[in-house]
Amino acid sequence: MIIVFAALLIVLIYISIPKKKKEEPGDVLDFPLPNDSEKLSPVLHQHVGFYRALNHAEKKVFESEVNEFLSKVHIAGMDVQVEELDKILIAASAVIPLFAFPDWFYPNIITVELYSDAFNHELETSGPNRRILGMVGGGIMNGRMVLSKKALHIGFSNETDKRNTAIHEFVHLIDKADGYVDGVPELLLDKHNSLPWLEYIREKIAEIHEGDSDIDAYGGTSETEFFAVAAEYFFERPELFEQKHPELYHKMIQLFRRAPEVQSAGSKELPGRNEPCYCGSGKKFKVCHGR
C-alpha cells in the first residue's frame, strides 16, 4: 500500500512540473535580447564585416541599434526554427544602411518571416519556380518582410560576392518610406535632386543592358532594383565599388551619409586571451569581450 501511494505521488509531482513548450516553425521566438555587449559583440565581430571595420565608439552605437531593432520587430520562423544568430544578422542588415541616421527607424516593418530556402510567390519552399530570396511589398505584404534563411547567411558569410539579400530588402523599405518604391528614396534625397538621380540611374541601367557594367544584371530590371542592387554592392564591397564606379560611389555616400569602411580590415577570428581586444578598447581580450 505504501509503495502504491509513493508511486502515485511521484506521478502527480511529474504531471505538475511545467513543461517547456516545443518550438515549432511559425512560432515567434522571443529570445532574451543580447543587451550584454560581451555576448552580442563577438557574434557581430565574427559575422558582420561592416561592424568589424567600425571604431570602438561606433561599435557601441551599432550594438545599441541592433538591440533597438530586435525590441521592435518580430522574427518568425515559417518552416524553419529561428536561431539567435538569424535575429542578429537580420537586425544588422537593417542597421547597416541607416547607420548614419540614428534618429530614424523603419516605420514600415513589423514582422520578418524566415523561410528555410528560396520560395515562390505563394511562399512555397518546394516545387517549381522557387527563385525568390527576399520580398517586401504592399497590400498583404505591408509591414512584412520575407527572407530565405539560407540567403541571409550567405549574404554575411561570403563577403566577396557583392550581394546581401537582407540589406537589399531593407533598402527597398527605405525606398518605400515615402509611399513609393521607385528607386528615389525621399528620406535620402532632397526633392530637387530626385529627378537628376532618376536620370542618372537610368544611364547606369543602360550600361548594364549594354554589358558595360559589373553591377548585377538584376539591377537592370528597374530603377527600384537598381538602387537596391547598387546598395548591396556599395556596402559589401566598397573598395571595389569605388574603383569600378567612382561617380556612383560618391553619389551613394551622399545618399547614405557615410562611406563604408573597407570590410576586410581585421580578422574574423577572436584574439587570444592576452591579446588586445578586437573592439578597440585597448584592454586585453580576457578582461574585455573574452570574459
Image (cartoon, helix red, strand yellow):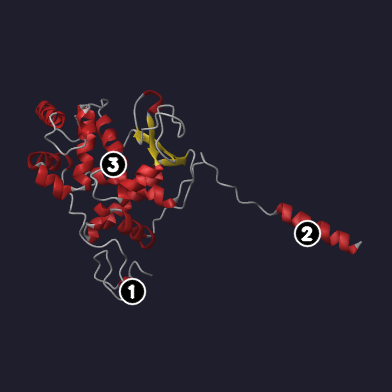
* Crowding at mark 3 (Cα within 10 Å: few <14, some 14-19, many 20+): many
Which residue bears the numbered disc 3?
A: 167
Which quadrant of the rendered structure holds the N terminus?
bottom right
Going by the numbered disc 3, the residue's amino acid type is: Ile
The residue lying at 17 percent from left, 48 percent from top is 238
The residue lying at 12 percent from left, 31 percent from top is 207
Q: Secondary structure at mark 1?
A: loop
In-front residue for pair 216/99: 216
Q: How many marks?
A: 3
Q: Quadrant of residue 247?
A: top left
| Real-space CA distance between mark 1 and mark 3, rounded to the nearest whole angstrom | 33 Å
Going by the numbered disc 2, the residue's amino acid type is: Ile
Q: Secondary structure at mark 3?
A: helix
* Crowding at mark 2 (Cα within 10 Å: few <14, some 14-19, many 20+): few
Q: Position of residue 192 (x, y in %)?
A: 10, 28
Q: Is residue 132 left or right of residue 267?
A: right
Q: Is residue 131 left or right of residue 246?
A: right
Q: Quadrant of residue 169?
A: top left
Q: Is residue 147 left or right of residue 238?
A: right
Residue 259 in view of the camera? no
Q: Position of residue 250 (x, y in %)?
A: 10, 42
Which residue bears the numbered disc 2?
A: 10
The vertical placement of 247 against 240, above or below, is above
User: Which mark sits nearer the N-terminus, 1 or 3?
Assistant: 3
Going by the numbered disc 1, the residue's amino acid type is: Arg
Which quadrant of the rendered structure holds the C terminus?
bottom left
Q: Quadrant of residue 136?
A: top left
Which residue bears the numbered disc 1?
A: 273
Given contact means CB atoms under 8 Å apart, are the residues at marks 3 and 2 in contact?
no
In-front residue for pair 137/237: 237
Q: Secondary structure at mark 2?
A: helix
User: Which mark sits nearer the N-terminus, 2 or 1?
Assistant: 2
